Amino acid sequence: MSRFVVLVVVLVVLLGLSHLSLGNGKSSFIIHMAKSQMPESFEDHTHWYDSSLKSVSDSAEMLYVYNNAIHGFSARLTAQEAESLQNQPGILSVLPDLKYELHTTRTPSFLGLDRSADFFPESNAMGDVIIGVLDTGVWPESKSFDDNGFGPIPASWKGVCQSGTNFTSSNCNRKLIGARYFAKGYETTLGPIDESKESKSPRDDDGHGTHTATTAAGSIVQGASLFGYASGSARGMATHARVAVYKVCWIGGCFSSDILAGLDKAIDDNVNVLSLSLGGGNSDYYRDSVAIGAFAAMEKGILVSCSAGNAGPSPYSLSNVAPWITTVGAGTLDRDFPAYVSLGNGKNFSGVSLYKGDLSLSKMLPFVYAGNASNSTNGNLCMTGTLIPEQVKGKIVLCDRGINPRVQKGSVVRAAGGAGMVLSNTAANGDELVADAHLLPATTVGQTTGEAIKKYLTSDPHPTATILFEGTKVGIKPSPVVAAFSSRGPNSITQEILKPDIIAPGVNIIAGWTGAVGPTGLAEDDRRVGFNIISGTSMSCPHVSGLAALLKGAHPDWSPAAIRSALMTTAYTVYKNGGALQDVATGKPSTPFDHGAGHVDPVAALNPGLVYDLNADDYLNFLCALNYTSIQINSIARRPFSCETSKKFSVTDLNYPSFAVVFPEQITAGSGSGSNSIKYTRTLTNVGPAGTYKVNVISPSNSVRVTVEPETLAFTRMNEQKSYTVAFTVSSMSSTTNAYGRIEWSDGKHVVSSPVAISWT
């Protein structure tokens, strides 16, 4: 029986550097308008926007008019014009157009989808679900977009298949139902797109977008592999869902005005799920274009899934922390691609590689450390032009990881005449192994192994080595483990909202690929593949996007918050043998700041029993609790909203499926002021049969007492709601060490589980 393999990648777009401009001192800006304040003299809001713009510049032209993601427009202005515009009536804010950068199977069977088809709706129900993907575009010829067996395009679909360079409307079909591209913000800042290097159309010349879309919803493709690695049937999470692609990223990056335009059209097109491996950095929610656009999508009933970022294992490294976004971290699969380093002293060390080529290392070869074969101070990194050909020719070269791309190091070794490469992690990456489709025989080893190999290189006068490629191995344990690169909490914007929400497969994931570049993406890589294997939270995000589509097909009436809750409260944090989920960065059990609620379990999520639901007003009350001004809230809500002065707002009242409890460090027990106790309120909605749920508290710490009232909740009908409170009380001297626990409600059949993370600040 063929192994199901999946498709995935996502693009994690983290906040780039400073705002760029293109000559004449002009830059692009996003202007948020208070649409409710439009003067009666204007019949149409676009005329009002144009008049506001013309009041500060006769020559300025709009880039985009936004109708859904925000109310407003984007335009190219001088700093003085932008400042003047900020002071015009009805203008909420004028924000610079920010540049974002691209980051960068076996999954269905690993998630239990191959043996659980009967649990999910028939294909005709799933065929009504549309996943919108904002990324680098699409390679429509990929077999993963085969529409054989698909019925008519859903009547709800309002989108188009936009023509452009190397792309026509006929490239879409009943699977890939829509494709658009957005480049005005990009071109305003960096100049016209060079159509000799990339297609000014929805076509994907990069690969990430195709990988993303096919991960979420690729059709089943028999006999897929990358050079024979990970062979089996490739399929997305929701194979019967439709795909709509919005190209917002280009060679020079992605700009917030284009991302907002993509969101704006996706909402208008009536997608059901949005997959954005894009991040808004660490800006306040009212300055974060992705968070603002995601709020508008949420109000329309669209679940928005975003990647957490690849900046782990550092704390506070998360992107996309808004509570209305589902934030996804990355874990490993139970599959590996071993490639061993065999040394002249008889010792063997394990590594990983996806190399497959005519060159083989059937014998021991001379072995050299790059730092000793270079005149450059950073020669150990194997950067372009740093190796001395006479000292590496015909040898295997040990390179250190860092700065330049991993696959580029191998290309540098090859160009200098090297026969092979061993790539060693440094402290920044530890012992986490990520496989690459190198251009020459090469393997990647962890930091510990790399240090051992370096000792051999310095102690043996004539060091030799060879590399042995072992192909694909499955059943690797423990798995999953949290990837070291996966960004971690706490949440730097609102510590009381635990992020990431969940983790999903994101290491060595196979998915569809572009025909425009090779698997390494290097210019000198002339290989072309139908599928590629990549790693990153970029890959974990579309897993969750596809799983959300499955739940939407099974439960069309569920809100985005209900779907996220189902995925979170059924996630697991222990292996089948009872051991705790591990973090590869530490070799120790992972925490809720690493894995959120745990690793996603889609079959369990289909029948969660109870959910924590939320609507737009709940999130607006949350913004009130953050003491946002009415103008700041209007920028997000796209309408006037005033916080009730008679009401006390608290971030602890947001009906979130997890608990992040923050105590001031100076708190001690018995203070008598009551400040040593923090209360949370939550409401559960029954989405299953009648039942009585009892609470079980897994205490986070001896120094914190957790009290839940009531301890029993009885549900007699569908959609019935019951509330409870949780009091977290410091019962001994406060600690500066984080503590973790869980609160679980069970009726004997369902377990509705919420992580607890306690910290002191």
Image: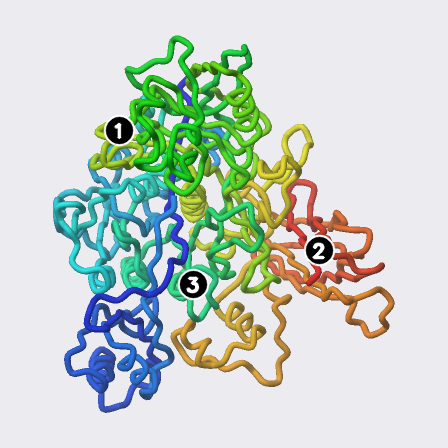
Q: Is residue 726 above or below residue 623?
A: above
> Quadrant location of the C terminus?
bottom right
Report the residue at 40% width, 13% height from top.
365
Residue 514 visible: yes
Tell which circle, 2 or 1, labels the residue nearer the N-terminal end: 1
Tell which circle, 2 or 3, labels the residue nearer the N-terminal end: 3
Q: Residues within 10 Å of mark 2 (few under 14, many from 20)?
A: some
Three-letter amino acid code of the residue under disc 3:
Ala
Q: Position of residue 756 (x, y in %)?
A: 67, 53
- Camera-side residue: 593 or 338? 338
The residue wearing badge 1 is 529
Tell me the number on the disc at residue 713. 2
Q: Position of residue 546 (x, y in %)?
A: 40, 43
The reply to whether dot 2 and dot 3 touch (C-beta < 8 Å) is: no
Look at the numbered disc 1 and give the secondary structure of its residue: loop
The reply to whether dot 2 and dot 1 touch (C-beta < 8 Å) is: no
The reply to whether dot 3 and dot 1 touch (C-beta < 8 Å) is: no
From mark 3 to mark 1, how far is it between C-alphas? Answer: 35 Å
**Front disc: 3 or 1:** 1
Q: Position of residue 367 (x, y in %)?
A: 43, 19
From mark 2 to mark 1, how far is it between C-alphas? Answer: 54 Å
Tell me the number on the disc at residue 291. 3
Q: Residue furthest top?
A: 363
Residue 559 visible: no
Q: In which quadrant of the rendered view does residue 728 lie?
A: bottom right
**Front disc: 2 or 3:** 3
